[in-house]
Amino acid sequence: MTDAMEPILQINHLSKRFGAVQASDDVSLTVLPGRLHALIGPNGAGKSTLISQISGFLMPDAGQIFLKGRDVTHLSAERRVHMGLGRSFQVSNLLLEWSARRNVMLAVQARRGGSFRFFKNVWKDAELRAAAEAALQKVGLQDRADIRAMELSHGERRQLEFACALALEPAILVLDEPMAGLGPEGTAEMTAFLEELKHSIPILLVEHDMDAVFRLADEISVLVYGRIIASGPPETIRQSVAVQEAYLGSSSDAA
Amino acid sequence: MSTLLIAEQVLNGLQLGVTLFLMAAGLTLVFGVMGLINLAHGSLYMIGAFCCAFVSVETGSFLLGLVAGMAGAAIAGAVLEVVVMQRLYARDHLDQVLATFALILIASEGTRWVFGDVPLFLDVPQAFAGTVELVGGLTYSKYRLLIIFVGLVVALGLYWLIARTRLGMRIRAGESDREMIAALGVNIRLVYTIVFALGAALAGLAGSMVGALSSVQVGMGEPVLILAFVVIVIGGIGSIKGALIGAVLVGLVDTLGRVFLPSFFQLFMNSSDATTIGSSLASMAIYVVMAIVLAVRPQGLFPATGTSSA
Amino acid sequence: MTREFWVSVVVLVGLPVAAFIAHITGETYIINLLTRMIVLGLAGIGLNFALGYGGMVSFGHAAFFGLGAYVAGIAAFHAFDDSLIVSMPFELGGTNQMLLIWLIAIFLAAVLAFLIGLISLRTSGVYFIMITLAFAQMLYYFAISWPAYGGEDGLSIYLRNEFPGVQTDKAFSFFLLCFAILLLVLLLCWRFINARFGAALQGARMNALRLSSIGIAPFPVKLTAFVISAMIVALAGALYGELNGFVSPSNLSWHMSGELIIFVILGGVGRLVGPLIGAIVFVLLETYLGGLTDRWQFFLGLILLATVLFANGGIMGLIGGRTRHD
């Protein structure tokens, strides 16, 4: 391992408080190129709050966020996307009335720009269509391109979200529980997919499925009450006493 | 500009304010609890005024008229709720706007049908006619003072109802979690009907009392309705406290603006131009206040988030 | 081609044919009625751009409609007696040239909509409905209390303004002029909606969070659509003033805003030609129901209520079939 690798995402001393609740307490973590960094922790540990701050929907009280070495702490969510921050949501977040293809085409459009073009027909735009087809192909949804998002299965919607995220050509992906609700087979497929993907796009993964986390992660951080209590390679985390007590120990049946 | 004039205008503003509060309280409750935007609230105000005028003239008793105004509006409200509104709770705001707009057309034309095109006249009750001398040589209309008093009593009563009673508890629960309250076995439909009828009764009360100051006619509810909307937007939709503070603010700004803006412009331009500009600006003043409030706080002064801030 | 397309074609061919027949048989009243349908439909199409495609439930579009009408009225008023609108700091007189009037109306509406949108679009849901209503009321009360242009009584346009090469005072010529504008606006809207802008706008309506998370900020997209919508409505307002030869504060009232929403919903939300159909039905009801009884608004109310409660999707939803999203 060379220390010269520049982190894609770096979070320094992030803090956020809601009234009496310290949702993020001096959180620092980095995601390196080609790596998957998993963030685990019990419910209510502040994982969603952290993701919201990273993606720019919530402003931290203190601390900085760097994307590819640039300070993005005060940039809008949309600017961060343009700088290469891709994300998926816990609950599917799609344009349900539109076909899968249209969903991806809008993402391609967002990447290429031109949302203030008024005349050329967007749905016949060969450039957008081709890029959308390619993204659908990557997630294996090419045969379902004409189906409306609301008619897709839960697992297919997950795939579609990935297609949209990939269409943005992100430098890093922040994934919020991508395995949730997928079932054993879907989880296995998703794990294989992410294992492949992380080599081209580094990933910050928030996930409850411990098998998947320990199989995929190069590094794991454990968040409890807004604070990172342990951080390191999977073996270290598995053996950490603090983690066992705070987290894994309390739900040994889950691991 | 004498202190007496200012004091009198402040009282006028307060009187308009409490009237608006009576309207706004119902609107904001119905929105907070049922999520319904009800344009037809002004029609309930009108129906109350017509019932009051009719019964007062027939019986010669203003008090009976007032009771009839409230009861008439409450009954009309309950019927509307059961027949129409219940179908609208789950709809989007657009459908609600259009359906209640349609109800205004029906109510206005229906009232014309029954009472004709001529306005009814309602007299101020004998006991409250004339003026009374207040501190410092200020004389003021007894009836307007009565309106202010009634409005403040209703505000206190609503506060007590929502904070202290079983019905109030259910209303608060209904605001924060409709499914939960249904799961607890509370008859949520009945609570909705009661809340709607309560709001209607307050609108009827406002219409009846104001009817004696002006005339009772079709369309009288519409300007008041729009002012009440401004009130609840400023106060924060769903909040009774916000409605009270917003109402007094709107009442004062509107009244004082109409009186003092023209005089203000006379300080540096000729009198007819000043009157024109002053009164034009005064008629826009409350909307400017609303725009400023929303530009700074898009959810109003007291946003009701889930739980009632009453 | 979808059924919606064919319904639209029938309506767009039917209107000029009807007007032509009325022209031959000398039924000026009918031509004016058809013109009224077109002008109100144009306003509805303008509102639909914001409401149907952008999901912005504006209850204050009468502000733009009335603004357009007043621009036509005020320009004609000063052109008629050759006086100045503004004498300081520069001199500006009236005009009787429709093209210039329209440009001014559209420009002023754009500025006004930009300012109103800037504040209103920070809010959403019921706040947006009410704040747009309040801004329109602001203009309404201003028009009532400003005596120079008739105040509450309104303002007459004694001679219809002029358009190069068109005898605007002839009912059929004016109808054709309005119809040409309608077609032009429909064409533009159709292009806008199916361009990248339209895709972003509809995305913002369906799911603003989705739009943000792919890197398109919803606010400027919606604000632009709001401004375009206001410009169309203002143009319709100017034509409406010309048609009636009269402008008044009622063009700015919240009843007008309500009627514009009625056109959209009656015809079908988010259907290009829907609001025109809504306006046609509205004018027919107004004319024929109004001929039967003075209380026609009572029955209009019942019909509207029934439409909302039982026929979601409007007339286009009933006869035009489902919208396509391939």
Image (cartoon, coloured by chain):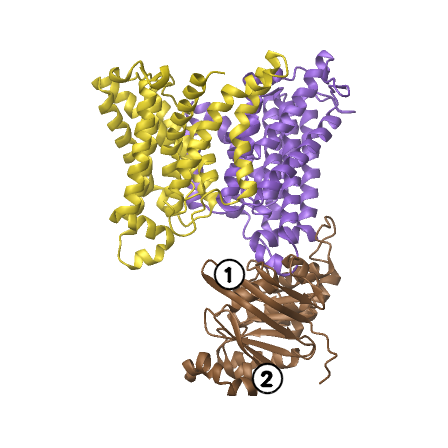
Chain colours: A brown, B yellow, C purple
Q: Nearer the viewer, residue B178 or C306?
A: B178
> Could you tell whether B97 is left or right of C184 in the image?
left
Give the image location of residue A53, x and y in percent. Answer: 58, 63
Depicted B181 relative to depicted B191: above or below: below
> Could you tell whether A204 is left or right of C91 in the image?
left
Few, some or many C-alpha atoms within 10 Å of disc 1 (few <14, some 14-19, many ≥20)?
some
Q: Quadrant location of the N terminus of chain A? A: bottom right
Q: Nearer the viewer, residue C72 or C125?
A: C125
Give the image location of residue C161, x and y in percent. Answer: 71, 21
Depicted A244 relative to depicted B198: above or below: below
Q: Secondary structure at mark 1?
A: strand
Residue type at tag 2: Pro
Residue type at tag 1: Arg
Q: Secondary structure at mark 2?
A: loop
In the rendered structure, find residue A233 and report the number of the disc placed on it.
Answer: 2
Few, some or many C-alpha atoms within 10 Å of disc 2 (few <14, some 14-19, many ≥20)?
some
Give the image location of residue C221, x and y in percent. Answer: 65, 49
Q: Quadrant of residue B180?
A: bottom left
Depicted A204 relative to depicted A126: above or below: below
Q: Nearer the viewer, residue B173 or A23?
A: A23
Q: Nearer the viewer, residue B42 or B281?
A: B281
Q: Residue at x 50, y 44 (%)?
A: C314
Q: Find disc 1 in the rendering and name its residue.
A: A17
Q: Residue furthest front?
A: B136
